[in-house]
Image (tube, rainbow, N blue to C red):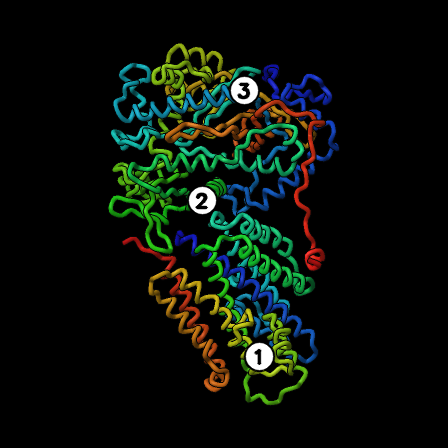
Amino acid sequence: MLSRTADHLYWMARYIERAENLARVLDVTYNMSLVPNAAESEAALWLPALEISGNVELFEQHYSEITAANVIHYLSLDMNNSSSIYCALRSARENAHAVRVTMTSETWENINALWLEFGQFIGQDLAKSGLREFCDWVKARSHLFRGVCFGTMLRDDAFSFVRLGTFIERADNTARLLDVKYHLLLPEQEEVGGAVDYYEWSAVLRSVSAFQAYQKIYSDTIEPWRVAELLVLRRDMPRSLHACFDEIMPILELLSGSRATECKRLAGELLSKLRYGKMRDIFQRGLHEFLSDFIQSNNMLGTEVHKTFFSIVAK
Amino acid sequence: MQKPAPTFFDEMQLSVENADSVDVREIYKAYQQWLKGIPRDLLDSKRQEAELLFRRVGITFNVYGDDDGAERLIPFDVVPRILDAKEWGSLSKGAIQRVQALNMFLHDIYHKQEIIQAGIVPSNVLTNAQYRPEMFGVDVPQQIYAHIAGIDLVRTSESQFYVLEDNLRTPSGVSYMLEDRKMMMRLFPDLFRRYKVAPVDHYPQLLLKNLRSVAQTGVQDPTVVVLSPGAYNSAYFEHAFLAQQMGVELVEGQDLFVRNNAVYMRTTHGPQRVDVIYRRIDDDYLDPLAFKPNSMLGVAGLLSVYRDGGVTLANAVGTGVADDKATYIHVPAMIEFYLGEKPILENVPTYELSKEDDLAYTLAHLDELVVKEVQGSGGYGMLVGRAATKAELEEFRIRILSHPANYIAQPTLALSTCPTLVDAGIAPRHVDLRPFVLSGKTVSLVPGALCRVAMKEGSLVVNSSQGGGTKDTWVLEGPSVAASEFTAAQTSAPIISQAEVSVC
């Protein structure tokens, strides 16, 4: 297929996934803010949400202080923040518009309808009311997007690029989320069992829809190292790093065909770390180090995907 | 100073004052009967439903310079334009005949120029700005230049149709023909049981077949692409739509490159050869090396590959010389010259202001004529005498006198009207008709057309850029059926529910 088309499809999927993860972070942080004494201050509670989205500096240029209202607006509807949900969804729709022919009409209409519906939120003060509904809506539209792709698209390269975008973005987002919260998961923090800790951990789990999975798998109190294990190494946990790379690897093999591409090698290397790694070793080296290495490698993978498939130069 | 309003032929002849009028034209009788049986506000709610659906599907066009990125809808009218099989038969034959002659003309003037030697078309056609000397002596597959042609027709009476214009460059609007039909079938399925409407949805397949048939000889399985200026072009929806319906790639200039006298597209599996380009970019922007050097839309080196037969362009480069208003005048003579046939479709009587007699007549009757610039298009550079003020008439008279050869004049045509849903209810509005003729190994068209309607009362301008809308055009396959003849479809095998299965 056309390189430009593949590029658009890949980014369309990435942006939708990004919007979903942002909504998850917002939703969970908001819930946390309802728990008394969850954090020492409003700013301390909302800073991680900013850190996960990776753009604290830009925030500081536009807002005087970190408050719930400011962070919520910045991450949801702020048109000046290129990583807001607004901008992510607009970019998703623009990418889709540019290649609507490669999608099934249902996929295109779904994204177009998403953008038209988004209009209802613009100008709203979500911090005052409607944030939950907004986050639910974003998540539901993202589910719908994946569903309509899965249910209607031909299993060809176009489909593969859509899926590739979804999982590279998801792996990045899960790793970021964990990394920002990693201090909670340090094994040294042996003072477990407090109500606040419980809320923090369960919030991390809920933000990736893993709370019920945790209960089902471990049937035990929430232990930090298990939370990390669930989100890094468990392949049956659909938002874990391992699960993402279980999807990414065969897609890259399919797309590369007989070519020995660097992106295939890189993905293989990451996958084997996730498949054969042990949580104890990861903690010994430091979860933060592990996660920042991972985020960096995953970014490199994205760059390689670009080099291999999207930028064909005339020779 | 308005002249008394002329009477117009109406496609339905539904009188506004009396909706129960029995004088309705035969083909609209079943429609009128249906109209009587529906609640008053149904059409309006259906129109709103259509608008919602069009927006959801994204059947929109971009407006240049509109900063909020607003994508607009072309107004869609829910009342169909209906043509019977006989009317259509002669229109389609006439359109095919015309396009055949135009293609032969294009081949001729880029080769032997026999029609000029025969004195039928004046030699100044070669100095027309639309004539492309680069194309002289170039052989194109099947000798087809205008693979896709849109012939604009207007009607003035029961039996009188005129060709207003030939569109041989990159005619657009066919997606509306197809989408309007889909919409009508969705909104009014019961009407399609009353009328046997000839289907049009095979148009993209026919187009693909034609495009494949004009690949260079020796190409076994030609790769066809649609070349678009991109998502910001006003007709982008149509480009995307046609590429999707044909199952071919929609490319932009940046996706293509020239190497070893061939055109390739950049794909995720490396370069892939392209054989036929259905281009929706004007000649001027096709190749920065040959035409406008600052064009970002085209492909460097494309023209040289094209001239060497390494790729087919549809439509060919240089077709503009045949749909120019100065050439239009000669199309009936072309038909007789190349085909030895009498033209089936008539031209609008046209005065060439380069001729002394015509000029004198035009200047004496300026207030009742339409004067057009020879190279103008889209309703620009035009004088509608009937609607002009005294000052405008004077100003135009001076312009004509300074360059008479730049202008032609035509009588103001009494364009037919068709009932159309407007705010006040159903009212007559002026319409035209653009069937799309496809030429390749064979020449054909699907039984349907783009019907444009001027939504403003009394307006004769149907262009979408001037607020015109579209209607679904029905070509009937046979007489309409009365309501009593419907039979309910038999239900097929019963559906098994979960409970029943688990018992087994």
Q: Is residue A157 above or below residue A287?
A: above
**Residue B429 image offset from top left, x and y in percent:** 61, 25
Identify which residue, A106 or B134, lies in the foreground.
A106
The subunit letter for the residue under badge 1 reads: A
Q: A35 left or right of A142?
A: right
Q: B209 left or right of B496?
A: left
For label 3, count other residues whose C-alpha is less than 10 Å away and answer few (under 14), some (14-19) or many (20+). some
Mark 2 touching mark 1, by CB under 8 A?
Answer: no
Identify the mark at residue B333; answer none if there is no mark: none
Q: Amino acid at mark 1?
A: Val
Q: Which residue is mark 1?
A: A227
Q: Is any part of residue A99 visible from this angle?
A: yes
Q: Is any part of residue B395 visible from this angle?
A: no
Q: Amino acid at mark 3?
A: Glu
Identify which residue, A266 or A77, lies in the foreground.
A266
Identify which residue, B452 or A130, lies in the foreground.
B452
Q: Where the C terminus of chain A falls, by quadrant?
A: bottom left
